[in-house]
Amino acid sequence: MADKKKKVLVAIDGSNISTDLISYVGESFSPVNTDIVLYHVDVEVPELFLDTGIEQEFFLKMHSVRAWMIESQKRIEEFMKKAEESLKGYGFTKDSITKKVVERKSGVARDIINESLKGYSAVVLGRTGVSKLKDFIIGSIASKLLGKMHHVPLIVVGKSHNPRKILIGFDGSDCAKVAVNHVGDFFTGGDCHVCLCHVVRPINLTQLVEEPENLPPENLPIDELEWLKVRKDSINPQLDSAAKDLIDAGIPQTRVTKKILVDQHSRAEAIIEEAKKGGFGTIVVGRRGLTFVEEFFLGRVGKKVFQMGDDFTIWVVS
């Protein structure tokens, strides 16, 4: 686990969701080991209008758009000041906080991606940003970034009530192991609780088609109990190794737990239900797991979870 100071990009738009972002960052990250960059992409016209293909100059002549621009600039200036003071309350110093407002160049999502390439350790943002123009939504920048940001962890903040209680969806993949390393890097202290959670689905045609690498030899009949034993024997040493990595990173041994959920037809639903039952505020998954992330973010269950799962902050790690 790395000891050097981390730089975190916190993308804000001044909305109530941005306030949740600041609370999450302050409660989750160490002020000693983290530099925060409060980053805002200033748009003259809401992107929703630009998507219509009509020239920007046309909208700039509209009274409602001009009023939106003035109000937006004032709101961001005020929010930046409040965010800085709030972070100081969590122990961050003025030197560890940078406020950065830039003009939109390629689009909000693309501008965030370009900025994130400048030595950042993670990107934090909310699910959506809402404009003050009645009945218009800027759009979910987080949804755009999910498919495009692969070089640093993407942290999508929800209404987390216990952000330092973390559930890692662990499938033994390389991405899952990287996710464990990131949790060890970012979360320290005795009040942190991390659960490594592995989900085993029943052996059936769907699973064997989705996970051909787990298909037993043709001459080896296998039933559910045998399948469960094979999976447990395979994952347990990896769970032990991941737990050791977390403990070595400074998380107390008594606050690192392991759990295997069996007979689950959906990994995504199982993880979400476990997070609800256990009172977890943060869910961490690898972007390229065996099949979990595809199901979680790209399938029907994933879309529903992302749209409605406001109670959780989700980390996506490549």
Image (tube, grey):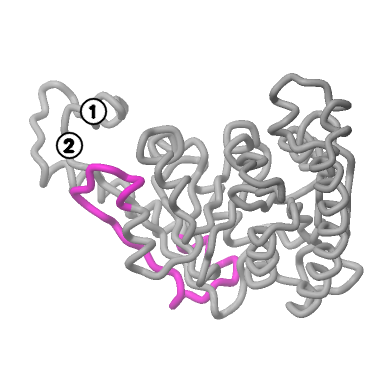
Q: Quadrant of the C terminus?
A: top right
In this rendering, would 53 be left or right of 105?
left
Mark 2 neighbour density, 10 Å: few (under 14) some (14–19) many (20 or more): some
- Queried whether the magenta region covers residue 290, the answer comes back as no
Where residue 104 sits in the image (x, y, percent)? 84, 36
Q: Which residue is mark 2?
A: 203
Q: Which residue is mark 1?
A: 208
Residue 142 sits above or below residue 10 on the image:
above
Q: Tell me the kind of residue under disc 2.
A: Ile
Q: Say which of 146 and 17 sits in front.
A: 17
The structure residue drawn at horizontal position 87% and vertical position 33%, both measured from the top left corner, is: 60
Q: Say which of 68 and 123 sits in front.
A: 68
Where residue 185 sits in the image (x, y, percent)? 64, 60
Q: Quadrant of the N terminus?
A: bottom right
Residue 205 sits above or below residue 66 on the image:
above
Residue 211 sits above or below residue 241 on the image:
above
Q: Which residues are magenta?
A: 243-270
Residue 30 sits above or below residue 234 on the image:
below
Mark 1 neighbour density, 10 Å: few (under 14) some (14–19) many (20 or more): some
In this rendering, would 166 be left or right of 189?
left
The structure residue drawn at horizontal position 66% and vertical position 51%, both measured from the top left corner, is: 125
In this rendering, would 220 be left or right of 39?
left
Q: Say which of 89 and 153 sits in front.
A: 89
In this rendering, would 191 be left or right of 139?
left
Look at the numbered disc 2 and give the secondary structure of its residue: loop
> In the rendered image, which quarter is residue 77 located in?
bottom right
Where residue 189 sits in the image (x, y, percent)? 60, 77
Which residue lies most toward the front here? 63
